[in-house]
Image: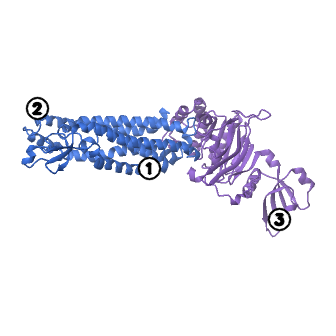
């Protein structure tokens, strides 16, 4: 069942009004987003925001309560071989069988995936200097993450989903892992979706951004466009909100004795801001991290779509109970 | 998937083979000496072909004195627990270990749907346990063959590990442990949670229901018992109060009557008891398959 855009561009990933309810609690609700082919998309949000829930529905591990996911135009059906084969997955904490050797893990990959690319897997281990006879339990966390990534790549799936791939790694291993992901993304047509609650590590490699909080998508789109559409204003502390141009995402009031001021993240277009420039206002471009933090601190109401229930009244998603 | 199943269970398979080998060594050593005693005590020939009271008592008494008591009780206690342990050790880790270590996200995100993953694993591991159970049963039946001619095979220490039931006990403990593993999500607690109901059912059937799978027969007490003391109801009692070797004596009734189960009910009883345990296995594994499929709505 292929669904084509008017322009004939099928996104790598499309979620439509996707929702997942655990008992009475919604872990994720009304999630609509697209990731174009070839993008490296960052899915950021605090712990418990519904990131893992969303990812598990995308890869076909979890059945949505409502809405649907399509990967390269094909509607995902949880627990079917076709859906599973389309997505490579590196789960949180990159689980591997501890008493397996690397060769055993690859044998498993071959046994359980029709298009397994053994050459790619072996070549990557050679490049990384990890012997195939090495047991999983005797490898460092960074090496285990690399084996997990290699297994996902060797599955030859066009979409790769990485769930908090570096959160358990030390800084050097993080850097190496991300460099490796970037290299894989650069010399292939692969689409990546990488979740993290640490923003800094994603900034350099991601060109698409999805911010998830309280089970809702707060912001989604190309990273450049989103950065350009936001500004950081520094204004006197007593500036009323109504005078601020654009939509206020987050406002921090400072009571510093030398200059009582407010720092405001606003969504606006730059031309409008120039026209209304005030003396005493400072306008700065926003960084990736400032943008994400602003939205995560905002959180009170979803901005990208209408929802009658304010986030504060929604029960906290507790996906952790099911992912312990 | 066959390779994956083998790789994940090969440690258990090797341990089971070692156990089987130890059992075989014990059975060969003990069985050989039992066989030679059986002939040297003069039981192998025409003695047993006739009913009791024809001069066999001394030979039977000597043989039972050597092999009847200690070996049987020890063997029975071990045999009671071992099938359950094998079953829960193999079954308890099958799903629970994946959930415990988070490897289910790896196993079930490959291109094999989890329903098929489970079906293949259950089929192969169940097959392996059936082979193990059959092999253990064969060894024990060979070992016990001389003894069985004197005591019959309806006694606890013969019935419980001959024929079909030993394999069925293993499978039942396995099925319980697989289901418990899915529900409890931890291997060791799942093993304990499966072993307790397994042992309970096992003992309740053995001591309450088995003797009445089919209505006991009643017969007049043997003439020799009628007039003299020394006719027992226990294992290896010579002479038996029915007057026939191999009957399972259940008790005496007023009017010098004896209720008993005849030896030719061994196989019907085996089928009934094994059937109960296989049905329990099927119920547990069926529930596991359904739950795992439904758990797609719950992630894991």
Chain shown in blue: B
Same chain under badges 3 and 2? The reply is: no
Q: CA distance from mark 3 to mark 2?
A: 113 Å
Closer to the camera, B46 or A45? B46
Q: Residues within 10 Å of mark 2 (few under 14, many from 20)?
A: few
Residue A236 sits above or below residue A87 on the image: below
Farthest right residue?
A: A275
Could you tell which of marks 1 and 2 lies nearer the N-terminus? Answer: 2
For mark 1, name the chain. Answer: B
Residue A142: x and y in percent read 59, 44
Residue underneath mark 1: B190
Which quadrant of the rendered structure holds the N terminus of chain A?
top right
Looking at the image, is mark 1 or mark 2 nearer the viewer? Answer: 2
Closer to the camera, B227 or B288? B227
Question: Left or right of B104: which side holds A199?
Answer: right
**Disc sitting over residue B46 in the figure:** 2
Q: Which quarter of the figure has residue A276?
A: bottom right
Q: CA distance from mark 1 to mark 3?
A: 60 Å
Q: Residues within 10 Å of mark 3 (few under 14, many from 20)?
A: some
Check if mark 1's residue and mark 2's residue have beta carbons within 8 Å.
no
Residue A236 sits above or below residue B276 on the image: below
Residue underneath mark 3: A261
Q: CA distance from mark 1 to mark 2?
A: 53 Å
Looking at the image, is mark 3 or mark 2 nearer the viewer? Answer: 2
Same chain under badges 1 and 3? The reply is: no
For mark 3, name the chain. Answer: A
Chain shown in purple: A
Is residue A95 visible in the rendered structure shown here? Answer: no
Q: Secondary structure at mark 1?
A: helix
Closer to the camera, B36 or B53? B53
């Amino acid at each position: 069942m292929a669904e084509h855009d008017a322009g004939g561009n099928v996104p790598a990933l499309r979620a439509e009004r996707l929702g997942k309810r655990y008992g009475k609690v919604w872990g994720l609700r009304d999630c609509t987003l697209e990731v174009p082919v070839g993008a490296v998309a960052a899915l950021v949000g605090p712990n418990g925001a519904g990131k893992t829930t969303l990812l598990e529905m995308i890869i076909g591990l979890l059945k949505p309560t409502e809405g649907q996911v399509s990967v390269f135009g094909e509607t995902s059906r949880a627990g079917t071989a076709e859906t599973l084969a389309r997505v490579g997955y590196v789960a949180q904490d990159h689980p591997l069988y501890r008493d397996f050797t690397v060769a055993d893990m690859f044998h498993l990959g071959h046994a359980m995936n029709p298009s397994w690319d053994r050459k790619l897997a072996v070549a990557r281990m050679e490049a990384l200097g990890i012997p195939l006879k090495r047991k999983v339990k005797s490898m460092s966390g960074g090496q285990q993450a690399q084996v997990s990534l290699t297994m996902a790549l060797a599955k030859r799936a066009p979409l790769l989903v990485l769930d908090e791939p570096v959160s358990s790694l030390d800084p050097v291993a993080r850097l190496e892992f991300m460099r490796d992901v970037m290299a894989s993304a650069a010399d292939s047509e692969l689409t990546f979706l990488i979740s993290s609650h640490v923003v800094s590590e994603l900034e350099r490699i991601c060109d698409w951004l999805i911010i998830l909080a309280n089970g809702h998508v707060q912001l989604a789109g190309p990273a450049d466009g989103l950065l350009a559409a936001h500004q950081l204003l520094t204004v006197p502390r007593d500036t009323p909100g109504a005078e601020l141009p654009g939509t206020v995402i987050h406002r921090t009031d400072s009571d510093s004795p030398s200059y009582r001021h407010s720092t405001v993240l606003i969504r606006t277009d730059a031309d409008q801001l120039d026209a209304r420039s005030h003396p005493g206002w400072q306008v700065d471009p926003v960084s990736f991290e400032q943008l994400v933090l602003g939205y995560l601190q905002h959180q009170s109401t979803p901005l990208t779509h209408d929802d009658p229930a304010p986030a504060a009244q929604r029960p906290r998603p507790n996906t952790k109970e099911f992912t312990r | 998937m066959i390779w994956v199943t083998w790789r994940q269970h090969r440690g258990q398979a090797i341990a089971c083979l070692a156990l089987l080998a130890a059992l075989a060594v014990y059975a060969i050593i003990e069985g050989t000496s039992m066989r030679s005693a059986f002939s040297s005590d003069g039981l192998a020939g025409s003695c047993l072909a006739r009913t009791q009271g024809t001069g066999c008592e001394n030979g039977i008494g000597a043989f039972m004195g050597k092999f009847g008591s200690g070996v049987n009780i020890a063997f029975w206690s071990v045999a009671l627990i071992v099938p359950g342990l094998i079953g829960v050790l193999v079954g308890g880790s099958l799903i629970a270990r994946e959930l415990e270590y988070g490897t289910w996200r790896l196993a079930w995100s490959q291109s094999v749907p989890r329903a098929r993953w489970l079906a293949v694993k259950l089929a192969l591991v169940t097959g392996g346990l059936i082979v193990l159970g059959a092999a253990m049963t064969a060894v024990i039946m060979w070992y016990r063959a001389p003894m069985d001619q004197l005591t019959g095979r309806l006694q606890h220490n013969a019935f419980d590990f001959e024929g079909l039931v030993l394999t069925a006990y293993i499978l039942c403990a396995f099925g319980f442990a697989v289901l418990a593993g899915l529900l409890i999500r931890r291997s060791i607690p799942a093993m304990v949670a499966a072993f307790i109901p397994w042992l309970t059912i096992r003992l309740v059937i053995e001591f309450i229901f088995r003797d009445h799978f089919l209505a006991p027969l009643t017969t007049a007490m043997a003439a020799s018992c009628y007039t003299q003391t020394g006719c027992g109801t226990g294992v290896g009692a010579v002479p038996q109060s029915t007057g026939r070797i191999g009957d399972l004596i259940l008790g005496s009734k007023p009017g010098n009557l004896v209720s008993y189960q005849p030896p030719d009910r061994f196989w019907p009883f085996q089928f009934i008891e094994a059937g109960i345990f296989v049905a329990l296995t099927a119920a547990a594994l069926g529930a596991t398959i359904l739950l795992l499929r439904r758990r797609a709505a719950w992630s894991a």
